Image (spheres, rainbow, N blue to C red):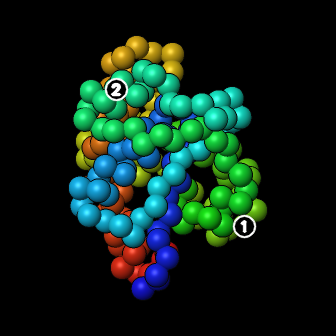
């Protein structure tokens, strides 16, 4: 078993809606389980919002769902992230395609796994929808979708930790 933490990176377009929400929700689930072997971060594929806080509408949706924002500031994905993270989780197919285009090895490509892999049973969507141009209910929907997906993701991470993949 590795002594270093297992590192997870959530990725969306601008790092102000979906990926920071996934980071916050994942951290809350990890805290509830007392899991301290996992580190979580988020970023965007684009440089639109570097240094900004998450969208106020997403922060409100997280708060309504009982989650606490940890102070993350938007940043853009860097090629070095392939070496820094064990699991890189794009929120939609466009994000996934952008990451695959940056990956230069099969190992890097294997680290990229879409968020939809852990969607709850019965979920018909194949990506986390971008709520940016929607209303409050769209942001609430994203938080709910991510919250429902986290138990599956954490089971997968735990299995990886058991195999010593960190």
Left or right of residue 46: residue 163: left
Which residue, given by chain and number where applicable, does mark 2 sit on? Answer: 61
Q: Position of residue 85 (x, y in %)?
A: 57, 63
Task: Specify the quadrant of the image occupied by residue 138.
Answer: top left
Instruction: Decide which of 100, 41 is in the foreground and name it.
Output: 41
Q: CA distance from mark 1 to mark 2?
A: 37 Å
* Residue 7 higher or lower than 27, as above or below: below
Label 1 secondary element = loop
Q: Position of residue 92 (x, y in %)?
A: 53, 39
Whether residue 124 appears in this view of the structure is no
Counting every numbered tag in the picture gives 2
Q: Position of residue 115 (x, y in %)?
A: 45, 47
Task: Specify the quadrant of the image occupied by residue 98.
Answer: top right
Instruction: Decide which of 70, 106 is in the foreground and name it.
Output: 70
Kindly identify the residue that appears in the image at 30 percent across and 42 percent down.
Answer: 147
Which quadrant of the figure contains the N terminus? bottom left
Label 2 secondary element = helix
Q: Position of residue 144 (x, y in %)?
A: 29, 34
Which residue, given by chain and number where applicable, does mark 1 sit on? Answer: 105
Of the residues tagged 1 and 2, which is closer to the observer?
2
């Amino acid at each position: 078993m590795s002594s270093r933490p297992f590192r997870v990176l959530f990725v969306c377009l601008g790092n102000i809606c979906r990926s920071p929400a996934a980071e916050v929700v994942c951290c809350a689930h990890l805290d509830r389980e007392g899991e301290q072997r996992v580190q979580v971060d988020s970023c965007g594929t684009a440089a639109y919002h570097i240094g900004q806080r998450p969208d106020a509408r997403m922060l409100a949706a997280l708060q309504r769902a009982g989650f606490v924002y940890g102070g993350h500031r938007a940043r853009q994905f860097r090629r070095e992230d392939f070496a820094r993270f064990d699991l890189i989780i794009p929120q939609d197919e466009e994000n996934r395609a952008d990451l695959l285009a940056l990956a230069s090895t099969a190992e890097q490509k294997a680290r990229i796994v879409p968020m939809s892999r852990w969607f709850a049973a019965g979920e018909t969507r194949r990506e986390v929808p971008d709520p940016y141009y929607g209303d409050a209910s769209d942001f609430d929907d994203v938080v709910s979708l991510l919250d429902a997906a986290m138990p599956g993701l954490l089971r997968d991470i735990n299995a990886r930790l058991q195999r010593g993949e960190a």
